[in-house]
Image (cartoon, coloured by chain):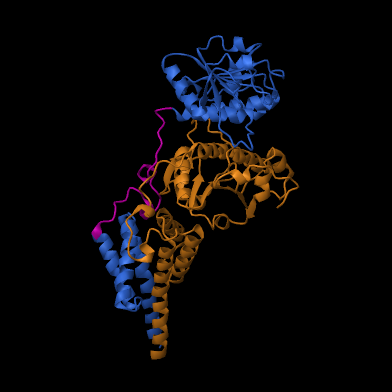
Chain colours: A orange, B blue
Amino acid sequence: MKLAAKPRGGIENLGPAPVVILVRPQMGENVGAAARAMLNFGLIDLRLVAPAFGWPNAKAVAASSGAHEILNRMTIHARLTDAVDDLHHLFATTARPRGLNKDIVDARTAAARARLQMARGRRVGLIFGPERTGLENDELTLADALVTVPLNPAFPSLNLAQAVLLLGYEWHMSTAAEPRPETPAETPAAESPAGNPHAPPATKGDLDRLLDHLLTELDDTGFFRSEDRRQSLSHTIRTMFERRRMTRPEVQLVRGIVKDLVHGRRRRKGEEGQGG
Amino acid sequence: MKLAAKPRGGIENLGPAPVVILVRPQMGENVGAAARAMLNFGLIDLRLVAPAFGWPNAKAVAASSGAHEILNRMTIHARLTDAVDDLHHLFATTARPRGLNKDIVDARTAAARARLQMARGRRVGLIFGPERTGLENDELTLADALVTVPLNPAFPSLNLAQAVLLLGYEWHMSTAAEPRPETPAETPAAESPAGNPHAPPATKGDLDRLLDHLLTELDDTGFFRSEDRRQSLSHTIRTMFERRRMTRPEVQLVRGIVKDLVHGRRRRKGEEGQGG
């Protein structure tokens, strides 16, 4: 989506920063204002998921106040899972955290954690929902942690670009200092590859494919019994995996196990078929 | 300057906060957006110095997104000295601090100092200049300290309301009493038991039984192929579970899944058997 705009200097000099993902933005102006807020604080990678408007968008360009390179680099995706496929660690912003089993942190803590993750070579994403409705529960479930900005409860009126601005500000203000011994990378090494903390972390895409695989097999066996039960249990299973930063080999191992249990079943079926 | 707007609740409950002074604002919408940003963070006293527009101002009201009480309480002054007459300690925001013999602090430090001053019963003011030109030197000299927001030097493009937002945010963040849940244990319980952070952690026994169950089934399908492979893979699987603090319901869920995948297999076998 090239726009007729001569990129300004500076981007080359900016260090790695989190990716900003705007889910179903309703107004082009807000995307432009978000791009402007991002560039103020050195955030340069913007991704849109199913925007409610076409692209290129004149209002977005106007509202970006010259942050053209952000819009030039921006990518548009059909689904959130596509937009975060290559990312390792996700923060989802939410006004009112629902009853999800997720860490809830403020923007400052999120920035510190993002720095820590990126210092380890992980790719980090900051997810923002639609202007009015915010993110759906199943979208929040994708995140490793939920981010809230403490506001005056009598007037919680932060717009999309302002939310992006505050997270960008905290990112810019944060330093790669405080280490937190709470992630797999800091647990003692196991001999086996999958347990090896130095193994590459699973991307969101790896986890998605694992969960799709598992859910498909469980559907096949009628595990869920009812759609309601499927909803809540699949949600629980996803949370269980998301909450634990798995390595890529671990995901492959679990997939191998599921496949094997099912394959074993199919093989027996085959034998039975021959034997019968 | 009363506007026909029913004040919303909340202001009475808000503690004392710095006064925001906008010097020669050029556009009404920026004043409205600033009022909105203020109320988000509990700043309620707004003063204008020689605005470039008349009052009341429809664009300001529209941009305030309902922060009417800020505009209702707002006062307008001819000169900055009049606007700060009753204040004790002033912070003046500036993009590029000139060669003035003044303390230069960031927004976070300014917020901390403002709290300190107010704890001593001083009245504090935050002064913001005109959109494009910023404050004049003689206006900056009125301040006890100058405030800058660190920005990407290649794109320092913060508008008036955003500057107010960031200082308001830092003021709000500096509140000692701000409760910030940061652990799952402090998040509301999830609908599904396995996702419930208050669920009891799995005991070593729970994990052992889960692993025995899984290994038995994998032995049954010949998953491991060789004793060496069984050794290392079972160790990996154990490590994977051990490392992650699972809740008891989560262990039960995983056992249910394994059982189901296998049971589905046996059920099929049964069907096949009858069929054969």
Q: Quadrant of the C terminus of chain A?
A: bottom left
The answer to whether residue B21 is magenta is no
Does residue B220 appear anywhere in the picture?
yes
- Is there any visible trace of residue A224 in the rendered image? no
| Residue A26 horizontal/vertical position (percent) | 65, 45
Q: List x then y, in percent, for residue B82.
A: 60, 9
Furthest residue toward right: A4
Give the residues drawn in magenta, as a range.
Answer: B175-204
Q: Quadrant of residue B95?
A: top right
Residue B188 part of the magenta segment? yes
Q: Nearer the viewer, residue B134 or B25?
A: B134
Residue lying furthest left:
B205
Q: Residue at x 43, y 48 (%)?
A: A100
| Residue at 42% from the left image edge and 65% from the top image edge | A249
Please give the name of the residue rendered at 46% of the width and 59% of the height, measured from the top-left corner: A202
- Left or right of B7: which side holds A210? left
How many marks can you see? 0
Q: Which residue: 44% across, 28% down?
A: B174
Of B106 and B266, nearer the camera is B106
Question: Which residue is the extreme one toward the bottom?
Answer: A275
The vertical placement of B196 against B93, above or below, is: below
Q: Which quadrant of the figure has residue B26? A: top right
Q: Is the magenta stretch mostly helix, strand or loop?
A: loop
Residue B198 versus residue A104: which sits nearer the camera? Answer: A104
Q: In this view, does A192 lie to the left or right of B140?
A: left
Q: In which quarter of the image is residue B79?
A: top right
